[in-house]
Image (cartoon, rainbow, N blue to C red):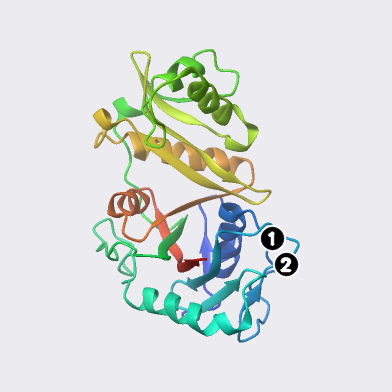
Amino acid sequence: MTPSPETRAFTLPSGQVYTARDLLRRHVEAVWGVSLLPLDVPLSDDGLTLSADAPAPSWALYLGETLPGGQRIPIWRADVALEQLPHLLALAEAALASSPLPFSQSSQPNATLLVSAPTVGLVTCEVALAQDSNAPITQPPADTLRLLRALSPDDADLATLLARFPFQNSGDDGDSEDEDTITYFRSPTRQPVVGIVAEGKLLCVAHSSRRTDHACELGIETHPDARRRGYALACTLRWAVLVAAEGLIPLYSALAENAASLTLAHAVGYRPFARAAYVVG
């Protein structure tokens, strides 16, 4: 008998088994620094409200939808007024309704990729993914693997490599900015950090953009001059192995319209366990 959508489990390559609701809980906690009650327990019709003492996320409503199956779980910030609930919920539901599922149900490498239109205004759609032990993985070329290395906080070359890398979120190069970047990547919360290094130049870097006691979320960036060479593929795979070796869940998320990021995730065996629309306000 095929498990129902509510009981279907995701088996990670490490052998860990989680329901989609387990993974959704760990994703939300990691990305927004909140603490959630287990989502597998019965919830009220209104969903779940964060504690007033918890850190307040930027969104008023996070409407998660588990995949496959499509059970929707509203998560509310504590300060949202009761009269706002119907309007905010309608906005999030409309966003999900207009956004197709991120992948076909096929686990084959050529599975159809579907993305939503760019998010508009206060509503953002995202897809959250975890590695599926049954999903095929595209292996990076052998010459790429030879360039792959761990970048530990005490790596003698780390400062120089990072200072020369054109991070998309950085502005003009400067000493203080470089120092902030180095401090960021040396932090224990950003480990593990892995990169592709060729001729003393950092071409791709993967790290834990978020970390909790249960999971890490991937952060990945490739040098503009080194794309489409399998570098992000190699870094993502190695990062996931190192995270799993710590007994943590390696998670991946992207905006629903980010076709390039979702294609990378699919290539390394990640499959969506949830999609969501969140309303900022």
Q: Is there a contact, CB below 8 Å, between mark 2 and mark 1? A: yes
Cα separation, mark 2 vs mark 1, equals 8 Å
* The disc label shown at residue 219, or none: none
Which is more toward the observer, 192 or 44?
44
- Please tell me whether mark 2 sits on a helix, a strand or a loop: loop
Foreground mark, 2 or 1, reads 2
Residue 5 appears in the picture as rendered: no
Residue positioned most to the right: 53
Amino acid type shown at disc 2: Ser
* Left or right, residue 172 beside residue 15: left
Q: To which residue does mark 1 refer?
A: 35
Pinpoint residue 234: horizontal percent, then vertical percent: 38, 36
Amino acid type shown at disc 1: Ser
**Does residue 173 lie above or below 189 as drawn?**
above
- Please tell me whether mark 1 sits on a helix, a strand or a loop: loop
**Does residue 147 lie above or below 12 as drawn?**
above
Residue 174 falls in which quadrant of the image? top left
Pinpoint residue 153: horizontal percent, then vertical percent: 59, 23
Residue at 23%, 58% (x, y): give it.
110
* Left or right, residue 73 beside residue 100: right
Which is more toward the observer, 279 or 274?
279
Pinpoint residue 213: horizontal percent, then vertical percent: 68, 48
* The disc label shown at residue 51, or none: 2
